[in-house]
Amino acid sequence: MLSETAFQRLPGAQKLLRAIREMTFSREIRLMEVCGTHTMAIAKAGLRQLLPPGIQLLSGPGCPVCVTPAGLMDEVLRLSETPGLILTTYGDLMRVPGSVPGDDLQRRRALGADIRWVYSPMDALELARDNPDRQVVFLGVGFETTAPGTALSVLEAKRRGLSNFSLLCLLKRTEPALRALIQRPDFRVDGFLCPGHVATILGAEAFRFLPEEYGLPAVVSGFETGDLLAALYALLVQLREGRPRLENEYTRAVRPQGNPAAQALMAQVLEPVSDVWRGLGTIPESGLGLKGEFQDFDAARRFPFHPTDKEGIPGCRCGQIICGQLRPQDCPLFGKGCQPEHPIGPCMVSSEGACAAAYKYQRIETQV
């Protein structure tokens, strides 16, 4: 059973904020959110400004676009120019550069590549149905939140016999990334705001390893300002008491064991594989790939696909930002060469990116 949570004992955002401000610690406290939606919600609400100076909020590797490495994007850009291919993707990936400044899918589309935005992988499936003489590839980016829908599209393609549909599986798993982050020698985080979206699929219990194996407080949080304040208060109470544990603030959406149907769908189609993360490198079993019986729908097998280990664009600090080592404002390109209208790094591109959040609400962020 999850413990009684602090948000149940102290309702009301003003009371929560007042209680947080009244807490005192003998050292700086560093808390990390690992969800891009949390990052944007925290910035929009100005929570960094509201918290006491001794409490820092750091952004972690919770934006799927941001953790996609430059070498992989280079290969995606090359794939997009395959004759007769329709490449489909979520909107955020359109402006993510590879290792060359300004070279992204939006540019390749302007130069003639057939690249189309879709809202879901099922849209890509319909394109394959409507264009039987064309190959359609869906770029399946995301964490466990988008994995069930991506798996379903492959099952549906097999059921319909759509041999011209394939998936470039760029899905990533949250737990291995957090373990890799914690095991870094420069890691210094005192507690985690766990991602509510991922937890709706995996369940709150998926994050129990944080307190039980690493002694780190963990609270699954929703996305409203009250949710975030309640989760932050719960983390600070755990630190003050010296009793790290798992708590679920987001009980209206997250169950302890998650969504069994979604988990079964993923298990039927996908399996863990090693994957490369921007800022974290190669992490065993941190990605998701297609199981053997679905290999015919694997775009990386259907087309030559060999990502390199090229570094990101010089000067970009996205890798350090998503590991909590730097704030967006610490990057030498932030707000200068790198802006939402002309992004250089993926953290400025994505609507869930730490740099995009800080830039959009920079009047709040820079007043801390």
Image: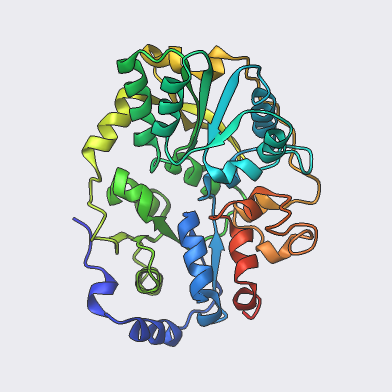
Q: Is residue 60 left or right of residue 194?
A: right
| Vertical side of 261 occupied by 30: above or below | below
- Residue visible at 66% across and 17% down in the picture: 83
Q: Is residue 17 left or right of residue 309?
A: left
In the picture, which quadrant includes the N terminus?
bottom left
- Residue visible at 55% across and 55% down in the picture: 351
- Residue visible at 49% across and 79% down in the picture: 25
> Which quarter of the picture shows residue 15?
bottom left
Counting labels gives 0
Q: Is any atom of residue 69 visible in this view?
A: yes
| Vertical side of 304 occupied by 352: above or below | below
In the picture, which quadrant includes the C terminus?
bottom right
Q: Nearer the viewer, residue 249 or 365?
A: 365
Which residue in the rendered view is the most extreme toward the front?
Answer: 130
Q: Is residue 90 left or right of residue 291?
A: right
> Which quarter of the picture shows residue 69?
top right
Residue 268 percent location from the top left of the image: 30, 24
Q: How is the image coloured?
A: rainbow
| Vertical side of 244 occupied by 276: above or below | above
Residue 176 percent location from the top left of the image: 46, 39
> Which quarter of the picture shows residue 362?
bottom right
- Residue visible at 57% across and 59% down in the picture: 188
Residue 330 percent location from the top left of the image: 72, 64
Q: Nearer the viewer, residue 313 or 173?
A: 313
Q: Is any atom of residue 208 visible in this view?
A: no
Q: Is residue 21 left or right of residue 16?
A: right
Residue 224 percent location from the top left of the image: 37, 69
